[in-house]
Amino acid sequence: QTVVTQEPAFSVSPGGTVTLTCGLSSGSVSSTHYPTWYQQTPGQAPRTLIYSTTVRSSGVPDRFSGSILGNTAALTITGAQADDESIYYCVLYVRTGISVFGGGTKLTVL
Amino acid sequence: EVQVVESGGGVIRPGGSLRLSCIASGFTFDDYMMSWVRQVPGKGLEWISRINGNGDTTDYADSVKGRFTISRDNAKNALYLQMTSLRAEDTALYHCARERIRNWFAPWGQGTLVTVSP
């Protein structure tokens, strides 16, 4: 069974830069996995940040960027702000027809 | 406004069945794949099922395969999830979402809560 891995937690200072990663239990992540990143705050539905590896969703600040970093997908936040404190989920298309979410990364800005 | 609204959740006993509905508006429904994603309160997201625009291709996560059936009625702009043999671990908030590009789920509904409990 394919597992999508994310750091459980991360912290960043206000104004700092942080890179969250999204990997596979076996193999490398590529654009063919359609890496997509969501931000979720308590009580709210997820909000799309990045789709198709690098494409920023409408209205998402340009301090959020997506990439492939080594064998993982990555979400980089440059110039973190207090309201970036959220849980970040990635999802990968792991095989025909099947998508799997990572467990989420709880980001603290302090 | 593009939106989806889920309904049909409730409290159900283990082994029981339930059908969730999702009504879409503001977009050409049959142009899009649709998915169901669930979230146990306080836990992570789990993609569970997808259906293509004309309804002839469906996919399921292993956790629900053989127990859940996704379907759609394009004339009614409606998406469904028939859930059978429900288990305690199926307790979650169930969201439907339009899938614009693979894995790009937008918008999400606010979800409908399914509680499986004796």
Image: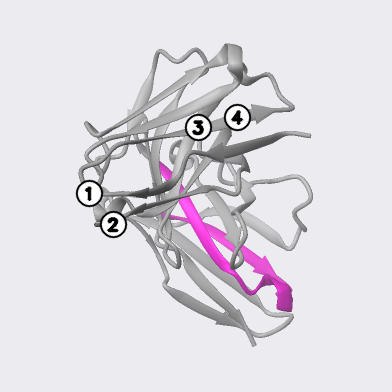
Range drawn in magenta: A72-93
Left or right? Give the position of A49 relative to B21. Answer: right
The quarter of the displayed image where residue A51 is located? top right
Question: What's the CA distance linking mark 1 and mark 2?
Answer: 6 Å
Q: Residue A61: x, y in percent?
A: 77, 58
Q: Look at mark 3 in the image and give the residue it sits on.
A: B21
Q: Residue B17: x, y in percent?
A: 29, 37
Does B27 sit above or below residue A106? above
Q: Look at mark 2 in the image and give the residue it sits on.
A: B117
Labelled pair 1, 3 in contact (Cβ < 8 Å):
no
Say the numbered circle drawn on residue A17. none
Would you say residue A105 is visible in this rendering? yes
Labelled pair 1, 2 in contact (Cβ < 8 Å):
yes
Residue at (58% x, 80% y) in the render: A108
Question: What's the CA distance linking mark 4 and mark 2?
Answer: 27 Å
* Amino acid type, residue under disc 3 in the picture: Ser
Query: Which badge, 1 or 2, comes first in the chain's sequence?
Result: 1
Say the numbered circle drawn on residue B14. 1
Q: Look at mark 4 in the image and give the residue it sits on.
A: B23
Query: Which badge, 1 or 4, comes first in the chain's sequence?
Result: 1
Query: What secondary structure is marked by label 4?
Result: strand
